[in-house]
Image (cartoon, helix red, strand yellow):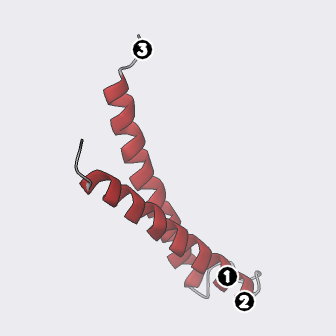
Amino acid sequence: MLFSKDWFSKFMVFFGYLMAIIYIGLGVLLFVPKIYPGIPQNLKFAFALFFFAYGLFRLVKLITKKTEPKE
């Protein structure tokens, strides 16, 4: 077998945290007015809120999954 289930599970958890950080970072980046000046401000604001909220949702979901007791 090329890789074990434990290794793949740890990799996917790391990848989940990485994607949550990327979504939050993109949301914060879109709030900066000098980045992407050609896009209308209200559209940037809507996408910034979406990415920031989705990143926080993913992060909270990962943290609560990690802290819940094993059965």
| Secondary structure of the residue carrying numbered label 1 | helix
Q: Could you tell me which residue is drawn at 51 percent across and 78 percent down?
A: 28
Q: Quadrant of residue 68?
A: bottom left
Q: What amino acid type should be assigned to the residue bearing mark 2?
A: Asn
CB contact under 8 Å: marks 2 and 3: no
Q: Which residue is mark 2?
A: 42
Indicate whether 59 appears above or below 49.
above
Q: Residue at x 43, y 46 (%)?
A: 15
Which comes before the other along the chain, label 1 or label 3? 3
Amino acid under disc 3: Leu
> Which of the labelled discs sits on residue 46, or is there none?
1
Q: What is the crowding at mark 1: few (fewer than 14 residues within 10 Å), some, or many (at least 20)?
A: few
State which tag comes first along the sequence, 2 or 3. Answer: 3
Residue 70 in the image: x percent, y percent?
Answer: 23, 44
Labelled pair 2, 1 in contact (Cβ < 8 Å): yes
Q: Residue furthest top?
A: 1
Disc 2 versus disc 1: distance between alpha carbons? 6 Å
Report x, y in % for residue 45.
65, 85
Residue 62 picture quarter: bottom left
Q: Which residue is mark 3?
A: 2
Identity, as a three-letter code, of the amino acid under mark 1 = Ala
Real-space Cα separation, disc 2 to disc 3, in angstroms:
48 Å
